[in-house]
Image (tube, coloured by chain):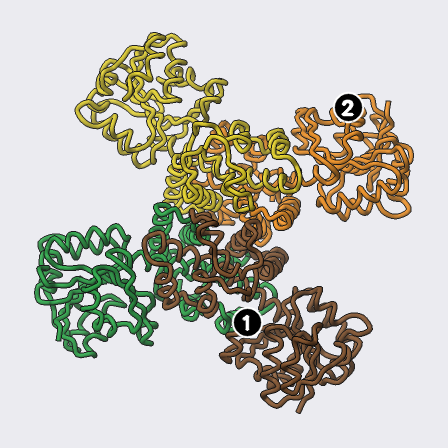
Chain colours: A orange, B yellow, C green, D brown
Amino acid sequence: MTNLGFVGLGVMGSRIVKRLLDAGYTVTGYNRTKAKAQWLLDLGMRWGETPRTVAEVADVVFTMVTDTRALRDVTEGPNGILAGLGPGKVYIDMSTVSPAASRELAMRVAEKGARMLDAPVSGSVVTLEQGKLSIMVGGDYETFQQVKPILETIGPKVNYVGGNGQAVLMKIATNLNLGAQMLAFSEAVLLAEKGGIPRKTAVEVLLNSVAASPMLCYRGPFVLEMPEEAWFDVNMMQKDLLIALEMGRQLNVPLPTTAIANEFLTAARGMGLDKNDFAIIFEVLARMSGFSPDHKPPAGE
Amino acid sequence: MTNLGFVGLGVMGSRIVKRLLDAGYTVTGYNRTKAKAQWLLDLGMRWGETPRTVAEVADVVFTMVTDTRALRDVTEGPNGILAGLGPGKVYIDMSTVSPAASRELAMRVAEKGARMLDAPVSGSVVTLEQGKLSIMVGGDYETFQQVKPILETIGPKVNYVGGNGQAVLMKIATNLNLGAQMLAFSEAVLLAEKGGIPRKTAVEVLLNSVAASPMLCYRGPFVLEMPEEAWFDVNMMQKDLLIALEMGRQLNVPLPTTAIANEFLTAARGMGLDKNDFAIIFEVLARMSGFSPDHKPPAGE
Amino acid sequence: MTNLGFVGLGVMGSRIVKRLLDAGYTVTGYNRTKAKAQWLLDLGMRWGETPRTVAEVADVVFTMVTDTRALRDVTEGPNGILAGLGPGKVYIDMSTVSPAASRELAMRVAEKGARMLDAPVSGSVVTLEQGKLSIMVGGDYETFQQVKPILETIGPKVNYVGGNGQAVLMKIATNLNLGAQMLAFSEAVLLAEKGGIPRKTAVEVLLNSVAASPMLCYRGPFVLEMPEEAWFDVNMMQKDLLIALEMGRQLNVPLPTTAIANEFLTAARGMGLDKNDFAIIFEVLARMSGFSPDHKPPAGE
Amino acid sequence: MTNLGFVGLGVMGSRIVKRLLDAGYTVTGYNRTKAKAQWLLDLGMRWGETPRTVAEVADVVFTMVTDTRALRDVTEGPNGILAGLGPGKVYIDMSTVSPAASRELAMRVAEKGARMLDAPVSGSVVTLEQGKLSIMVGGDYETFQQVKPILETIGPKVNYVGGNGQAVLMKIATNLNLGAQMLAFSEAVLLAEKGGIPRKTAVEVLLNSVAASPMLCYRGPFVLEMPEEAWFDVNMMQKDLLIALEMGRQLNVPLPTTAIANEFLTAARGMGLDKNDFAIIFEVLARMSGFSPDHKPPAGE
């Protein structure tokens, strides 16, 4: 069976590795903080001293990091993944970066004789654990076919969308829906609540309705109680919306709801709420509707 | 078993009656055009000559019509439902009208000694046939308890939300999400498409993503081919958004995404596309992005 | 010289009457509260006991009231203006009401054998006193020609725009600019201020710039200190924007900036700021940007 | 009298130089295309072979170019302005670039022993020729005092707003008003026109109203006939709005009308109208309102 490598063992990355180990794959992992990976080592994951080492020992190496900068940190330099890649190897980046950054990296990977795929996911830890994760894949089609079984182990839904960078474009396009949906949902909850329906009832009914996307099903209840730790905070959401808006300008697609949702995320930052999950957009609208910041602090702030 | 009456045998109403007949209820129905109800008569539904007759023979009488005006047509006058109501009877309106109109009607029903519930549904014919319809109920709690089994026959999810008019408020709050979600979805599809991903692939991936609400799952494919007959046309959607915006002003809740989506529906009318399902909002944005009306006519217009 | 009548001696109405008296016209006035008109009586204005009396004694009678309801109060009933109108008389309404309401009233005036013009103004007390008021006129062109000299006494700029109701439509179209301009101005001031430029300097520079409309020139300084008494409060501004939005829907014109500004006025109401001049829209945006309601109370609230 | 230098003799720059020559200043100019400067040479302007030469011979040197890239072209390299600056010299940049780019350049100028001011203008050629230009100045206050008389020769209104980069921030804040004002103005004209008022009349009335900013006074008539050559095209306007939106995110100021206007500029590009003056935003809204691109082509496209 294929030798796998995985760089970036965060909340999502680590759970993906567990899934791969459970499926019987040999996985060599690397993370900046080794301690966080101990439970995976206990489950049989091997340790790679650097991203480069991981790339050297694996046939197929994955990365899943926060942004373009973090991606550069693990791919560049003498200890980076690029230094460890060579002919025959496949490198799969699951991070959400800009299409341009992804394409540029793919070219550098090709110069090493290896092939790169961009394979971001739609979904959260909950989606993954429910076995409902969706993976979009960009890059060479033949390479995609080759690693498809591995990707299907991670998420059952795997969609090939086009050449290098197209999957991160598709991911960005997917994520622009999240901001707008969360803002519209907040409008609905507040309208119901100020009209006399208990907030809890309003959320329950909305999550039974045809508007209840999977994202709203897990994030909607946050307007009742914000989680202690953000799943996807204001800055992370805004990072994706900014890439979307930038792409919209390049491709001449007006993005009205994305633009508005983005300004509400800016307001969340203005109000000092940026460490929260982006569901805090609800709080911005609540304060505009007259709820006092003092009397109705969302939990988990 | 309870004797039921049903006034308004349109696309949804007729299918609800079928469900009630299948469950063994005796149903007396009325529709402006009797011919459209023939298949239900064939299935055993009885015919009421007027809305008043239906209310007289039934213990529980339903209405499901297009708007406030149509509701007035079937409730008022010598042949209207109000004329046929009396002590002990329950009247359930499943139409989406304004909370104020619903409350006013409930008071008139009470004057007759009967009790009214507002019970709009979230979902379409597809949702109903999949047995996934969600019903919100407003009115007296005891009355709700009494008819709950009947409502559960229609849609498995039944939520009591408060006094008279609160369910239509909740329905309006639910529906404001639909305009915003459809517009954001259109932004996503066009961004992907103009970035080089086939429209069909973009739709498929989005419908596999965490943004895929049930509404988007059945309406999203309309951007590939518009249905011949609108399920919920531009004017119907706008009617609901206008009630939402009006309620937002009364209750001091700003509704930014609703306001924007509403202006795009106005644009759809400006472009002569108002007879289409409101998914045609996609076409408005497509033309703003440079697609020619001549070269890319949506099917079904 | 023509005998004039004037009903509604508020802030604007009374100053217009003074101007007419200064020009040598005989004016009979009426106001709900007579005391407020004392200074005009001292200047030679005659008193009419009812709107009807005013209409009876005058050749040309004006009204200038707050809204459709107030207009109805002074025109309908046994003591209303309609009861005092007859052949040869001209009735000029300077209020801002909906085009439909204005047209309906014009028809009733015509039934009396009189002719009506709608003649709303663009500008405030300051504009009037500077002799820069602009008047738009709708109705019969011949009638307009007949009273033009009187209107030119009030404001030097007089524009005939079309038949009955067209001037109030034009006024509504004019006023939709105000909300959007004030919101954009607020964005500019806050951007400069949070970037380190003193608010006072930012306002000064903006009022020297090409963006400085007359409205911004007198209202812009309100973001430094709100006036004790609103010139045009949140509810009055929103009344005009709602008519605009309603007309936009009827005429199929999307009004994106109007819709957004309107939602910010709703937020102003939500935050309890509706008694202020609509320049308070600045405060809504300031709070979204992180300014505390406690530490930066606008003066005059 | 001070020896002046001027790099960038475009539409505005050349007219500013003329003004300086008229006031008796000695000016050495440079432009990429010398031919365009012939009329200034005929008026007595001296020619500098490179930006560096201009900086060497002048005590106070100005630049006025299109964007950050063009600014870099004339300041960097062996023939750039920086190479010609030294102790005692003042360098004034009148371009509109990002505050960050301006600050960075100011530091490099300081390293040469010279001092830089950012001094963008608000207004167009018309404003300049009417002697109504407004100049905002950022940088060292003492330096500002020293060159103030020269700046007052260009535009009578000169405002000191703060340290380096603050004037371009103030300019960006000023310009964000333009997009929103033009879009709101378009809403007003179309509402009036579709309501039956001739477009020409609507424009005339609006330009007599309190909403008539100087910018609208010269740009508003463009909705009747677009100029052959754009004064400030879609891309230039969008460049400024993008800097504003970027600053808004950095400084936590939501910019709702700016964000919406920006999306309409994107639509203008999508519709292939980007070579036009940004007043073409009217055409985008007109098409959304049902005007056909075939039947109502704006002049000058």
The residue positioned 8% from the left and 59% from the top of the image is C86
The residue positioned 72% from the left and 33% from the top of the image is A137
In the rendered structure, the residue with mark 2 lies on which chain?
A
Provide the residue designation for mark 1: D122
- Occupied quadrant, residue B33: top left
Quarter containing the N terminus of chain C = bottom left
Image marks 2 and 1: residues in contact by CB distance under 8 Å: no
- Amino acid type of the residue that numbered disc 1 sits on in the rendered structure: Ser
In the picture shown, does residue D169 fall above or below B209?
Answer: below
Residue B264: x and y in percent read 46, 44
**Distance between the alpha carbons at the discs numbered 2 and 1:** 61 Å
What's the mark number on residue A149? 2
Q: Are marks 2 and 1 on the same chain?
A: no
Q: Nearer the viewer, residue A208 or D75?
A: D75
Residue C84: x and y in percent read 9, 59
- Amino acid type of the residue that numbered disc 2 sits on in the rendered structure: Pro
What's the mark number on residue C275? none
